[in-house]
């Protein structure tokens, strides 16, 4: 059994919230602990949004319940009428997180049959203590930057290996099948890395922390094109001379594949290969024509593959290393 940091934070916040509420002689003090449990988010931003939305939701819930209990009485029917209005309004204003916890707080008004100022203060203090402690606990979050840099290195190594194997498979259709599983493994790795990058962004208060998320999104776009290239490879069968330069360029791309390489030099070499294809003799039969067409599509996908990185390098700057 593994006890994570979030679990420890949740337990501590719940205990402290109850102790503080009891020390202030608040009614229904354990509710502060439950609010804390429900308010510890995965990131700093999510915790802030939960705390803010639940306080706003409590204001709305208090107003609606006051009207309902005043008109219908402090009874279950009035509570049901309150829910009929509160739930759709919460959904309309994006405050769904507060439906359950604030409805529990509203039952305190019903149980006490009172909206006295002391009861209003009691409920708002329960909310502020629980949500406030959760928010405070999440001010500390592990820095994921080092881990993300390691993920970049792993992803680039996997890409480089794929490109090298793709070069070896070009014009050898029977070898292409082994690359599909490698693509799937890399896709799963990039998905997890992108989720981690999203958490990293949400744990920063300042803007401009989207680099890693954009980086892994860029690599996923490249992988989609690489997958297309593998599909073309499985059908290409031309004279060895037709693919010699392209195979060599794929090997070179594999050797220089990195975060720092903006791809400009590779794009220039791709243009030379395009020109050589235009000057090549026309295909002799339909089969050769179709293979050359697939080869041309392969080259187009490879061009897009490099252009994606070139565009990324143009608009994104690598953050300074720690």
Image (tube, rainbow, N blue to C red):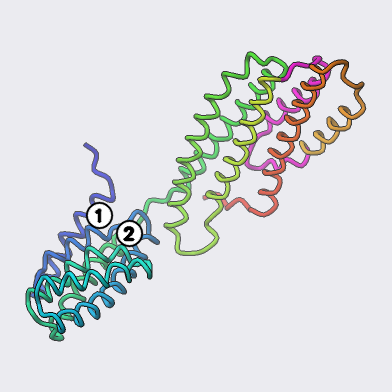
**Number of other residues with Cα within 10 Å of mark 1, as a class: few under 14, some 14 to 19, many 20 or more:** some
Mark 1 or mark 2: name the one nearer the start of the chain.
1
Q: Give me the C-alpha separation between circle 1 and circle 2.
A: 8 Å
Q: Nearer the viewer, residue 86 or 109?
A: 86
Measured from the top left, where is residue 115 in percent x and y? Answer: 14, 83
Q: Secondary structure at mark 1?
A: helix
Closest to the observer: 71 or 270? 71
Please report the residue visible at 63 percent of the width from the left and 41 percent of the height from the top: 259
- Per the rendering, the mark at residue 122 is none
Q: Quadrant of the N terminus?
A: top left
Q: Secondary structure at mark 2?
A: loop
Query: Picture quarter containing residue 61?
Result: bottom left
The residue sitting at 72% across, 43% down in the picture is 307
Question: Residue at 84% across / 30% down in the picture?
Answer: 273
The front one of 139 and 90 is 90
Q: Which residue is pictured at 69% across the width and 40% down the height?
A: 261
- Residue at the far bottom in the pictured view: 117
Provide the residue designation for mark 2: 138
Q: Disc 1 marks which residue?
A: 9
Q: Position of residue 211 (x, y in %)?
A: 56, 52
Instruction: Determine whether label 1 and label 2 are within 8 Å by CB.
Output: yes
Q: Is residue 246 rendered magenta in the image?
A: yes
Q: Residues within 10 Å of mark 2 (few under 14, many from 20)?
A: many
Query: Is residue 166 inside the magenta stretch?
Result: no
What main secondary structure does the magenta stretch of the protein show? Answer: helix
Magenta span:
236-265
Question: Where does the image place residue 237, in percent across and percent down from the top left?
Answer: 75, 16
Q: Nearer the viewer, residue 100 or 134?
A: 100
């Amino acid at each position: 059994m593994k006890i994570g940091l979030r679990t420890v934070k949740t337990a501590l916040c719940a205990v402290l919230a109850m102790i503080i509420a009891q020390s202030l002689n608040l009614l229904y003090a354990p509710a502060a602990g439950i609010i804390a449990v429900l308010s510890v988010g995965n990131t700093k931003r999510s915790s802030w949004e939960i705390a803010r939305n639940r306080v706003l939701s409590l204001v709305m819930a208090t107003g609606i319940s006051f009207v309902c209990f005043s008109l219908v009485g402090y009874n279950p029917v009035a509570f049901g009428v309150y829910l009929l209005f509160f739930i759709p309004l919460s959904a309309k204003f994006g405050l769904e997180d507060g439906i359950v916890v604030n409805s529990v707080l509203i039952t305190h008004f019903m149980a006490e049959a009172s909206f006295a100022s002391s009861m209003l203060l009691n409920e708002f203090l329960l909310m502020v203590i629980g949500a406030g402690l959760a928010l405070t606990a999440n001010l500390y979050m592990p820095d994921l930057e080092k881990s993300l840099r390691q993920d970049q290195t792993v992803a680039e190594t996997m890409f480089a290996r794929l490109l090298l194997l793709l070069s070896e498979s070009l014009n050898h259709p029977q070898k292409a099948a082994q690359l599909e599983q490698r693509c799937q493994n890399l896709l799963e790795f990039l998905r997890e890395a992108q989720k981690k990058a999203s958490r990293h962004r949400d744990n920063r208060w300042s803007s401009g922390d989207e680099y890693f998320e954009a980086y892994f999104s860029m690599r996923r776009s490249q992988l989609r094109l690489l997958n297309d290239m593998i599909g073309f490879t499985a059908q290409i069968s031309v004279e060895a001379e037709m693919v010699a330069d392209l195979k060599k360029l794929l090997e070179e791309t594999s050797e220089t594949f990195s975060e720092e390489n903006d791809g400009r030099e590779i794009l220039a070499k791709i243009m030379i290969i395009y020109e050589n294809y235009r000057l090549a003799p026309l295909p002799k039969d339909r089969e050769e024509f179709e293979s050359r067409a697939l080869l041309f599509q392969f080259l187009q996908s490879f061009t897009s593959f490099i252009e994606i990185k070139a565009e990324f390098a143009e608009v994104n700057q690598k953050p300074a290393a720690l």
